[in-house]
Amino acid sequence: MTSNWKVIWRVIVDGNDMTSAMRPYLIDIEITDKDGSTSDTCSLTFDDADGQVELPKDGASVEVFLKQVSKFKGTVDSVRSSGSRGGGRTLRVSAKGFDSRGKVKQPLLFHKDNATLQEFMDDAAKRSDISSIKLDPDFAKIRRDYWSADSESFFHLGEKLARELGGTFKMQGDQAVLVKQGEGKSVTGVHLPTIKGIVGVNVISWDIAPFKGRRSFTKAKVRYFDRNAADFKSKDVEFDLDRDLPESTNVIRTTAGDENQADNVAEARKREAEREGGEGNVEMDLTVEAQAEATFDFSGARAGVDGKYRISSVRHKADRGGGSTTSLEIKQPGGTAGKDTRKKGKKKSTSGGTTDSTFAGMSDDPLDD
């Protein structure tokens, strides 16, 4: 197949620029950046007729650039050969954002008394050969009488705390971060640029639900143990979601250790309710600036769908046939998303009279915004 790359790309393996050597064989590049639920990944697919591509070293470091922007750094995790009698052969090299072969997956069994979360996670990182872990300042200062890792790996411990606190836990190389979710910041705490998606300009397709009812609660109830009163109590926290919703309570099944932990859990459930209020998928022309947790400003579709969203996952894909796209998973609708603010009125019926607008929200002129 003739190479027709329209995107400038570069691949560095173990510090060596392999771009020229790979160019005759590389079929496509796919990079995925998620909001912390799983590791960033990258896959490189090669034309491997007669086994012509050299097998990469297990654990080799990989860095991939698209449009001269570094979009992935990680470690080779697996190599898969595929083929058939009449269909040719390919070699797919997959890499993860961190080295999954080391102590990061080793179960931890230890506890820490009267410590901050930063102190506890620093200890966990040291036991797992992680060079450093950066926490959101509000998370770092949380102090509890008792922290424990009960046969959990460092990775699973981070994910558990992220779920409890409403954060994003992510590992990049031998470093880890735990930051607040849904605030438009990268895992390093830097404010991310807003990504604009405009129908008819850079948006190829979209499939968006600007509001959903299943995960939309108006408050949370957390049970905790009051040591001074030697009794179990409950804490209710109301959510302000900027939506007209009937009352519903997210009752947390686990019991918090004290009132402060109950506050942390309730605040996390509030961020979750905001995030799960809507969802969708958008495919765009290649947009290398897009990152998980960035704000996505969508326009040109229709009233009530246009608005601001939070990017939860990004997939960049380019191939030697000339194609290159960015696919987004979006959540946390905001701004005008979910609100059709057009003027309400009557619409003409097919019989010449007037009738009430369908769904009590359609304007006299469908094009009238």
Image (cartoon, rainbow, N blue to C red):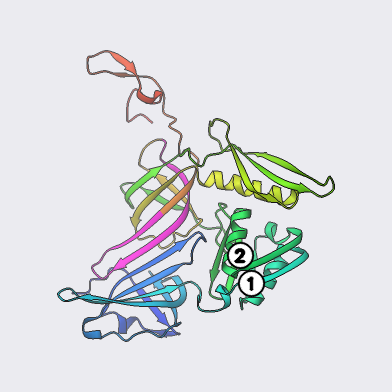
Expressed as whole percent of the image width and height from the top left, the position of residue 63 reads: 44, 76
Residue at image location 27% in from the left, 13% down from the top: 353
Instruction: Identify the amino acid type marked 2.
Output: Leu
**In the visual, does 296 lie left or right of 249?**
left
* In contact (CB < 8 Å): disc 1 and disc 2: yes
Instruction: Name the amino acid type tagged 1.
Output: Leu
Label 2 residue SS = helix
Q: Residue 108, which numbered label?
A: 1
Count of all numbered marks drawn on residues in the image: 2
Q: Residue 232: in sight, yes or no?
A: yes
* Region in magenta: 304-328
3D distance between C-alphas at marks 1 and 2: 9 Å
The location of residue 355, given as percent across then percent down, is 32, 16
Closer to us: 212 or 177: 212
Would you say residue 188 is visible in this rendering? no
The residue at which mark 2 appears reads as: 157
